[in-house]
Amino acid sequence: MTEWLLPDVRDGTHSRGVASSSPAQPIERHDSSVLRSVQHTFRLPAVSTSAAEARRRVLRQLVKWRTPTETCDNAQLIVSELVTNALRYTDSETLDCELHMLGPLLRVAVSSSGQGPASRQPSMAGEEDERGRGLLLVCTLAEGWGVRPADAGRGHTVWADLPLGGAGTR
């Protein structure tokens, strides 16, 4: 499976080059025979209320898994950003969301089946722009993130890996 890695934002200015940090390994590369893995998936219609519904479902599941509060908060923010981007930039009719806990990481992923923009490069947000900082937030909160094409050849999945450490649980 091919994964697209975009340049790292941490060495650039503001949101120029927002991207996946290269040292992070996708969860698929970890030896799952050694680490306990749990997964939860759900599908949402591609409508304006789906970001809020995704946040509610993510929180409900992470509370069941007794996930630390900070990870719950960060996962809700990330799923909201990824769903919003999929709604804004693809013509998908549905979105698939996934939570995958594997060892010390929680992967949050949103898959779209619709066609997106021809260019996969993030745009730069100006100081006065009200949009364009979502992937900067994802990059800041996640240990790593990236984009991979869909297995069927149409659409893509954007994923972010969060550490499961943290103080309190919900």
Image (cartoon, grey):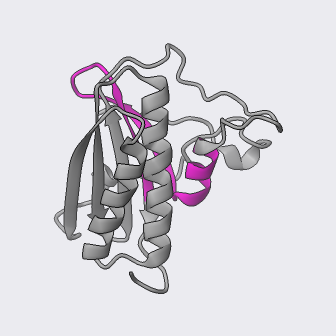
Q: Whole-percent x and y of residue 84?
A: 47, 38
Residue 157: x and y, percent? 36, 36
Q: Is residue 56 above or below residue 72?
A: above
Which percent across, then down, holds residue 92? 33, 24
Q: Nearer the viewer, residue 165 or 111?
A: 111
| Residue situated furthest front in the rendering | 49
If the image is split into quadrants, where does the C terminus sit? bottom left
Tell me, yes or no, if residue 14 can be seen here. Answer: yes
Left or right of 133? Residue 100 is left
Query: Vertical placement of 38 versus 146: above or below?
Result: below
Question: 96 or 140: nearer the eye?
Answer: 96
Q: Quadrant of residue 75?
A: bottom left
Q: Please tell me in which quadrant of the rendered image residue 140 appears.
A: bottom right
Judge whether 125 appears above or below 159 on screen: above
Residue at the outermost top position = 118
Instruction: Look at 36% across and 75% down and name the residue there.
Output: 67
Q: Is residue 26 visible from the viewing direction of this image?
A: no
| Magenta span | 135-161
Q: Is residue 154 magenta?
A: yes
Q: Spot the residue most to the left.
A: 33
Q: Residue 91, how many percent across, how many down?
A: 38, 20
Q: Quadrant location of residue 38?
A: bottom left
Residue at x 43% of width, y 69% of height: 72
Q: Is residue 104 above or below residue 132?
A: below
Q: Name the quadrant of the N terminus.
A: top left
Q: Is residue 4 left or right of residue 31?
A: right
